[in-house]
Image: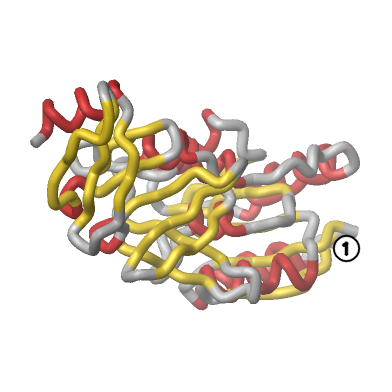
Amino acid sequence: MIRVIIVDDEAPARELLREYLTADDDCEIVAECANGFEAVKAVAQHDPDLLLLDIQMPKLDGFEVLELLDRSPIVVFVTAHDEHALRAFEVHALDYLLKPFSQERFRQVLERVKRTAGHHDRAPVAGIAASLRARPLQRVVVRGDDGAIQVIPVARLDYAEAADDAILIATAGAKLRKQQPIGELAQQLDPARFVRIHRAYLVNIERIEKIELYAKDSRVAILRDGTRLPVSRSGYQKLRELL
């Protein structure tokens, strides 16, 4: 039995997927979600085999949903935008359904899911999200230890600090932990606004008040709130090119 979660912000789209799924005796719908917040919660609760995931949704889009999951279902994207579908295919998401799609096309995808389900790699799907997300990012999503999801516009990001295999995102006087390498975040942000000033620090250059010499060939960036961050030689060269 394939346990399925449907995620789409449009009710007619959910109804169509429900109709096609209920026609197959091998499928069980365990949840239907109208937005990304519901989807993250439902995946954690039900641990589905298959996630039928819309991409273009308000609040949290499909890529941001994947980024927040700690479970790894088979992912089939459902989208009206073929550029998203092609990119999904390129990074080996199992498949995609391009709206509007026929029942025959749906059956083809579902048969592929069934062939894959028994030996699906349950590795985290966040890598798919990172490969597909539009660049530069306009917002960063973080899920706290209590399950609460925060969406932070990049304009409110002060700096990010490496913390082993995670990062600490500094915003409005708080630090939020996110499971993501700092180098990956640096690649996703606008290089004209965010600079890797040190192997452990990525800073919003709009927050920099001044740069001071700390020791020979060593400098420190002082932010507007008084925070002091180390600046490497290569980081200082990058700042000189932008400031």
Residue at the extreme left of the image, as rendered: 243
In the rendered view, would you say 236 is above or below 139?
above
Residue plotted at (33% across, 45% down): 229
Query: How many badges with numbers are in the image?
Result: 1
Residue 189 position within the rendered picture, expressed as x and y whole percent measured from the top left: 32, 42
Q: Does the rendering let one see residue 212?
A: yes
Residue 35 position within the rendered picture, expressed as x and y whole percent measured from the top left: 51, 73
Between residues 176 and 208, which one lies in front from this camera angle? 208
In the rendered view, would you say 144 is above or below 208?
below
Residue 57 position within the rendered picture, expressed as x and y whole percent measured from the top left: 42, 65
Residue 191 position within the rendered picture, expressed as x and y whole percent measured from the top left: 24, 36
Horizontal side of residue 113 vs 98, given as left or right = right
- Secondary structure, mark 1, is loop
Q: Of the residues shown, which amino acid type is indicated by label 1? A: Asp
Q: Does the rendering let one see residue 15?
A: no
- Please, which colouring scheme is shown? secondary structure
In the rendered view, would you say 11 is above or below 4?
below
Residue plotted at (79% across, 55% down): 49
Snapshot quadrant of residue 200:
top left
Between residues 42 and 108, which one lies in front from this camera angle? 42
Residue plotted at (20% across, 43% down): 193
User: Which image quarter is the C terminus in?
Assistant: top left
Q: Which residue is mark 1?
A: 25
Between residues 24 and 54, which one lies in front from this camera angle? 54
User: Which image quarter is the N terminus in?
Assistant: bottom right
Residue plotted at (22% across, 50% down): 222
Snapshot quadrant of residue 135:
top left
